[in-house]
């Protein structure tokens, strides 16, 4: 067993193998979600798909995540944690393996939707498991490890898929990605200690009552609207910039496109730094500045040199990371009850934005190429800025006062 219960509190003690296991849980949760992005041009050619259809193939996974996230916490509360995490990692491998047999983009969309149904079984439940089985500094370090792993998983999916298709056909590459999740399910089952503090709860009526209260919470509505605009922009940007760079005059290969996603690793650095800045200036001011930074990055992708596009993508990604951190802090300090369900609702709005971004930017790219896509992205970011400026309150409640953030808070940017 990777951890032993503490004699004083009966919570598990932190060990290095356990920290690595929890980080790998984050990796396996998100390694498949955006893996298609680095091979979109190749998939579009092979499956004879339109720009909108291939964009929807990316969006179907995040749509499924959005639809199932508010309810997966209720399922876990009733039936347990570890088994659901393990089975969800395993379930991600099945549609991934079947992708090696698809003959049309519509079949790919169906399998991508099935992938998305499995993701919340890891992402939502893992944080609840950590919060129950660990406490104090161990809990904080494990949550940080999980967040880091999830960012790394989002990067690795794109990076590995792009480079695998340099050496094998994309159908075989999907098989290799499925094997990764199968190995991951075994590692999670062996590495995570069994639940000791889980208490089954089937209080469905209480959850419905809490749901009604949260839907009327103005702070949560603002955060959900911001999350929608943010992932709309992020998915639209990093999906269709691949088609832009694969076309003349750049003609990037799948491996070249995979390398572009290295800018995502900035999230590991930027997010902790943002955590130090936000309490000083407040969520509202941080969002107003970071959204402008993200929009300037999007505009910068209109530059002709490749190095200018890469720098612009990095700037826009950093702006999105900081915006997400500020939104998470805003929820933690403004939503003081029903935080687990609030997290699920935020997930729903956040990933709905990703789906609409893949569809809407696909329409824009089809009609006017990359300049039209940039205009669409900047319009959505302007909407997000206006929402924060008009509806997001300032520091009415100073950070550090009141209840601490819940360990079941919203997800980091992927």
Image (cartoon, rainbow, N blue to C red):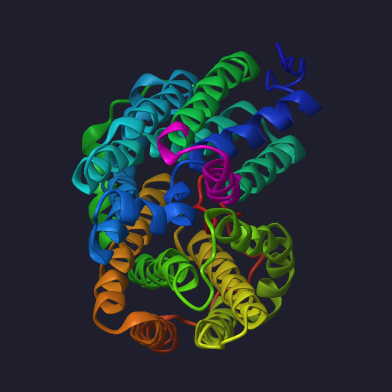
Q: Inspect this view and state whether residue 209 appears.
A: yes
Q: Main secondary structure of the magenta part?
A: helix
The range drawn in magenta is 153-172
Q: Is residue 87 magenta?
A: no
Q: Quadrant of the N terminus?
A: top right
Q: Is residue 244 left or right of residue 282?
A: left
Residue appearing at x 50%, y 71% in the figure: 245
Percent position (x, y) of residue 298?
A: 50, 82
Residue at the top extreme, as displayed: 1
Percent position (x, y) of residue 280?
A: 71, 77
Along the viewing direction, whichever of 145 and 210 lies nearer the viewer: 145
Residue appearing at x 44%, y 80% in the figure: 392
Along the viewing direction, whichever of 74 and 336 lies nearer the viewer: 74
Q: What is the number of callouts on the image?
A: 0
Residue at the right extreme, as displayed: 16
Along the viewing direction, whichever of 80 and 332 lies nearer the viewer: 80
Percent position (x, y) of residue 195?
A: 55, 18
Q: Inspect this view and state whether residue 216 appears.
A: no
Residue appearing at x 64%, y 83% in the figure: 308
Q: Which picture quadrant has residue 250?
A: bottom right
Q: Is residue 89 left or right of residue 255?
A: left
Percent position (x, y) of residue 132?
A: 57, 30
Residue appearing at x 76%, y 18% in the figure: 6
Residue 271 position (above or below residue 408) = below
Q: Is residue 275 left or right of residue 250?
A: right
Residue 283 position (above or below residue 133) = below
């Amino acid at each position: 067993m990777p951890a032993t219960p503490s004699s004083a509190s009966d919570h598990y003690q932190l060990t290095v193998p356990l920290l690595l296991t929890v980080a790998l849980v984050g990796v396996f949760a998100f390694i498949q979600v955006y893996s298609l992005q680095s091979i979109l041009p190749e998939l579009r050619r092979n499956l004879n798909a339109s720009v909108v259809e291939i964009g929807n193939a990316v969006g179907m996974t995040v749509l499924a995540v959005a639809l199932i996230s508010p309810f997966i916490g209720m399922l876990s509360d009733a039936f347990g944690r570890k088994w659901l995490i393990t089975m969800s990692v395993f379930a991600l491998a099945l549609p991934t393996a079947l992708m090696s047999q698809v003959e049309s983009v519509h079949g790919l969309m169906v399998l991508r939707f099935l992938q998305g149904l499995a993701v919340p079984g890891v992402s939502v439940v893992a944080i609840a498991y950590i919060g129950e089985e660990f406490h104090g500094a161990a809990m904080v370090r494990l949550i940080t490890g999980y967040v880091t792993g999830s960012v790394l998983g989002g990067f690795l999916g794109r990076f590995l898929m792009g480079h695998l298709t340099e050496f094998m056909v994309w159908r075989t590459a999907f098989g290799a990605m499925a094997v990764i999740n199968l190995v991951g399910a075994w590692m999670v089952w062996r590495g995570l200690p069994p639940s000791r503090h889980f208490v089954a709860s089937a209080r469905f009526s209480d959850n419905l009552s809490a749901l009604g209260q949260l839907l009327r919470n103005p702070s949560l509505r603002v955060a959900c609207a911001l999350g929608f605009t943010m992932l709309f922009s992020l998915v639209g940007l990093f999906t269709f910039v691949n088609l832009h760079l694969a076309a003349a005059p750049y003609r990037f290969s799948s491996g070249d496109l995979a390398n572009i996603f290295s800018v995502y690793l900035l999230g590991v650095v930027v997010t902790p730094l943002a955590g130090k800045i936000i309490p000083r200036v407040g969520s509202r001011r941080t969002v107003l500045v970071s959204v402008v930074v993200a929009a300037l990055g999007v505009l910068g992708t209109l530059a002709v040199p490749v190095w200018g596009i890469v720098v612009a993508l990095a700037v826009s990604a950093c702006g999105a990371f900081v915006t997400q951190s500020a939104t998470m802090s805003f929820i933690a300090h403004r939503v003081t009850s029903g935080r687990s369900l609030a997290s699920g609702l935020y997930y729903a709005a956040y990933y709905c934005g990703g789906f609409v971004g893949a569809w809407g930017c696909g329409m824009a790219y089809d009609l006017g190429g990359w300049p039209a896509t940039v205009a669409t992205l900047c319009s959505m970011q302007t909407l997000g800025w206006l929402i924060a400026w008009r509806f997001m309150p300032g520091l009415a409640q100073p950070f550090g006062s009141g209840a601490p953030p819940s360990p079941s808070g919203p997800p980091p940017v992927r």
